[in-house]
Image (cartoon, rainbow, N blue to C red):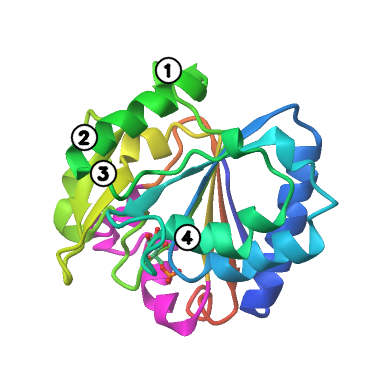
Amino acid sequence: MPTEIHIAGTAEQVAEDFAQYFADWVEKKPLVTVALSGGSTPKVLFRLWAERYRGRIDWTKVHFFWGDERCVPPDDEESNFKMANGLFLSRVDIPEGNIHRIRGEEEPEAEAKRYAKEITQFVPSRNGLPAFDMILLGMGDDGHTASIFPHQMELLTAEALCAVATHPESGQKRATLTGKVINNAKEVVFLVTGKGKAEKLEEIIEAKDGSGKYPAAHIEPTHGELHWFVDEAAAGRLK
Ligand code: 6PG
């Protein structure tokens, strides 16, 4: 399936462009399953969804999951859920049952299994795997995505739907969707902004030597679409 690159001038414009794309996309569907990314990039989007799309999207049609979560309590500053809930979910009309958070407070291995079961029960399958309607991803300066880091490339092909990962510097435990689930999505959307991502983005998009060592380079939906929403700073080295 095609890869589409959407370049906007600033990070704010990237969020605006994607928010409009998302609104048009949801409008056509009765119900969607969407996995959110963490980190700082999506903050602009979450604020936009709460402040400008509160009444423009029927949030009761959207079931939110997470692509990864830090193994911390939901009120911890590190929690991806806390960030999304504070900026967005608590500010729109979305039923609690539509929010499928990863329980970072639980024992990681047990939670990875529980979350995988929740996904299987809720997300329709295709090719024998859950097929999210959309998975939002970020990309780290080291080319990681979700919580699949360069030192744990095996998580790209792991049998499990959700695995326990370890942050390479902090050693922080994470729960992450594995590459197989991500690549089985109907749409995968990367939101990548900032100059710090330009080098990896060039290597990944233009598939220069070595891009195979970056997890984000292995996100190639088997049947779905791949979209990159990037700003000019991150796209600065693309031809
Ligand atoms: C996380 C994210 C992670 C993030 C990248 C980019 O839990 O941190 O899911 O994959 O998307 O690290 O982070 P920034 O958006 O902060 O650059």
> Residue, x 50% and y 23% (percent of image)?
122
Instruction: From the image, tell me which residue sits under label 2.
Output: 110
**x and y percent of residue 9 in the render?**
68, 79
Furthest residue to the top? 128
Of 119 and 204, the residue lying toward us: 119
- Measure the C-alpha gap from mark 2 to mark 3: 7 Å
Separation of disc 4 and disc 1 at Cα? 33 Å
- Residue 20 x %, y %: 77, 56
SS of the residue at dot 1? loop
Image coords of residue 58 (percent x, y): 79, 41
- Which kind of residue does numbered mark 2 sit on? Ala
Residue labelled with disc 3: 106
Tell me if 91 is positioned left or right of 117 in this view.
right
Q: Name the amino acid, label 3.
A: Glu
Of marks 4 and 1, which one's residue comes earlier in the chain?
4
Identify the magenta region. Answer: 193-218
Q: Which residue carries the number 4 mark?
A: 82
Above or below for 130 versus 80: above
User: Closer to us: mark 3 or mark 1?
Assistant: 3
| Amino acid of disc 4 | Lys
Q: Residue 127, which numbered label?
A: 1
